[in-house]
Image: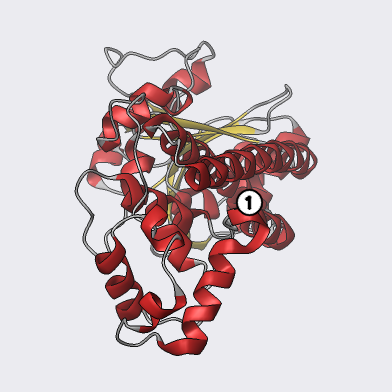
Amino acid sequence: MTPKAPPPLDILRRFAPGTTLRDAAELIFRQGTGALLVLGSSDQIDDLCTGGFRFADVPLTAQRIAELAKMDGGIVIDETTKTITRANVHFIPDPRIPTDETGTRFRTADRLASQTGLPVLAVSEEGRDLAALYVGDQRFVLQSPTALFAEANQRLQSLERLRRRLDEAVERLSLYEVDDIVTMRDAVKVIQRAALVLRHVEELELVAVELGDEAPLIRLQAADVAEGVPVLVDLVNADYQPRKPRRGSSIVPKLYEIPIEDLYHTSKVGETLGLIPLDREVSPRGLRALAAVPRMPDSVRDRLQKRFGTLQRLRSATLEELDQIDGVGPRRAARILAYLDQSNGIINPQIQD
């Protein structure tokens, strides 16, 4: 089966450990009855139901859902009023709606979700996975907390490896910038690896959302690994774009639009961002280098970049030349040179304000 895109995060939050719906799914799974739950009460749902019986103002609890699931029919839940409206019903979605599912319960859930746009939960009677959640044409498998923690740890390890590769690419770019031998490929590789870091953080958030209150440490670790990456991406892009981007603009949203398989191809990332040809020799504007100098107003950074134009000219500037720039002064000029010269010119990828 071809995996579908995951449902929205707000849907997943309803099924995090400790929520009523997640507790109900676990109770049903343990009692081995299976279930089909539609999260939404409407005339459209009524038209797709036959048999069963209706409820009036029956509060929604995990125990009630589990007991009603023993009757084998489907259950309709009104999340707005937090009530159970129908039980033991037979759902009849349009059989012409295509589905890759094999079991009757899961085929029905897939078609119901596609036809109504409402979240539909199918709980297994047995098997490895707890349940499958369908939203429109999307499918997501709910896993046990143990399996989720294992997946989260695996994703964190992958994220840390990607960050190390990003730092290596940044260090290499900085060395090449000092020697003035940068090609566009070197800059694009930094953005490419940064985009992979950000995409893996986004995927890890799906696991964190499903873990609910158990996820704070996972989010903290992911945030630490990805610290400074969005700023780094925009600075490298601003250094090498043929036309300098507007202040405050960001390419990060554009990176999220690139298909994940394309992020592994440097050429496709370069084409998408307009950083081509990859083998062209280029010189940075020096924006990333200036951003590493602490406690310097943006207006001063702009004047420095406008005055010198490239990192090479900025690095070769004297104290006297820097001092002439409005807002610099002798002490700041000395600090600028010190930061540009530190560590043989390697610019720290952890950008500081």
- The amino acid beneath tag 1 is Ala
In the rendered structure, the answer to whether residue 299 lies left or right of residue 292 reads: left
Q: In which quarter of the image is residue 97?
A: top left
Is residue 308 visible to us here?
yes
In the rendered view, tell whether residue 206 sits above or below residue 182: below
* Residue pointed to by mark 1: 208
- The picture quadrant where one finds residue 288 is bottom left
Return the x and y of residue 293 as percentages of the image width and height: 51, 72
Residue 82 in sight: no
Pointer 1 local density, CA inside 10 Å: few below 14, some 14–19, many at least 20: many
**Residue 99 in picture, x, y percent from top left:** 39, 15
Residue 263's place in the image compared with 297, above or below, is: above
In x, y percent, where is residue 24? 65, 48
Residue at the image position 32 percent from the left and 53 percent from the top: 238
Secondary structure under badge 1?
Answer: helix
User: Image point 41% across, 66% down: which residue?
Assistant: 317
Q: Position of residue 304 (x, y in %)?
A: 33, 71
